[in-house]
Amino acid sequence: MLERLREELWLLHLELPRNDLVKWTGGNVSGRDPETGYVVIKPSGVRYEALKPSDMVIMDLEGKLIEGALKPSSDTASHLYIYRQRPDVMGIVHTHSPYATAFAAVGKPIPVCLTAMADEFGGPIPVGGFALIGGEAIGKVVVDAIGTSCAVLLKQHGVFTIGASPTAAVKAAVMTEDVARTVWLAMQIGQVEVISADDVESLHHRYTHVYGQ
């Protein structure tokens, strides 16, 4: 089932180590099929270079296994919770990318001090509370804390990003780490200056309505 979505997710998973967002078997990408509503997600504990499209696991929104020979990611319940609460979300990514996770480790949001942040996120990258892995708790923190952003940090854990497609969610994960690194470097030089709310709104509108083809 869903061969095209499985292949898309397989390719997107390869972008995570390629962009230094994950190590070994950590992290995952999921995508929701708009026709069936089924969710495709990475199997648990499989190294990225060993993944195949056929390894991807298909679930329904309530967690019933639809197709797949391997156990789904340990984050599956939280992914499914997010999808149930956010019908606009069609892709979710979880990483432990180092610079963004450094902010998460100390429970601090990433301030909107770069035009690239205003463009992509429309504001600071917020931080949610601490939650244990395995159930829906992480998903609840994501939904409660993410607001209008496409990315959120989980205290002492890592990063979750969402998007209108799996590709958009992966892009948000890449951009989250990119701006986190730049902001951290800037903080070693001095205090960063936050961009005004009006300018952030203007930049985000241009990026989402004018920029590109």
Image (cartoon, grey):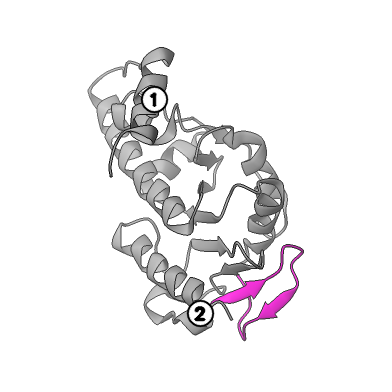
Q: Is residue 69 above or below residue 164?
A: below
To which residue does mark 1 refer?
A: 112
Q: Which residue is mark 2?
A: 3
In the displayed structure image, the side of residue 15 where residue 189 appears, left or right: left
Which sits in the foreground, 38 or 41?
Answer: 38
Q: Residue at position x 66%, y 50% from top?
A: 82
The vertical placement of 204 against 98, above or below, is above
Instruction: Identify the element where label 1 is drawn.
Output: loop
Residue 75 horizontal/vertical position (percent): 62, 61
**What amino acid is at disc 1?**
Val
Residue span colored magenta: 56-73
Q: SS class of the residue under badge 2?
A: helix
Residue count near mark 2 (Cα–Cα under 10 Å), binned few <14, some 14–19, many ≥20: few
The residue at 54%/77% (across/down) is 56
Mark toward the start of the polypeptide (1 vs 2): 2
Spatial CA span between label 1 and label 2? 39 Å
Residue 15 screen position, x and y as percent: 34, 63
Three-letter amino acid code of the residue under disc 2: Glu
Residue 142, horizontal then vertical, whole percent: 62, 43
Question: Mark on residue 33?
Answer: none
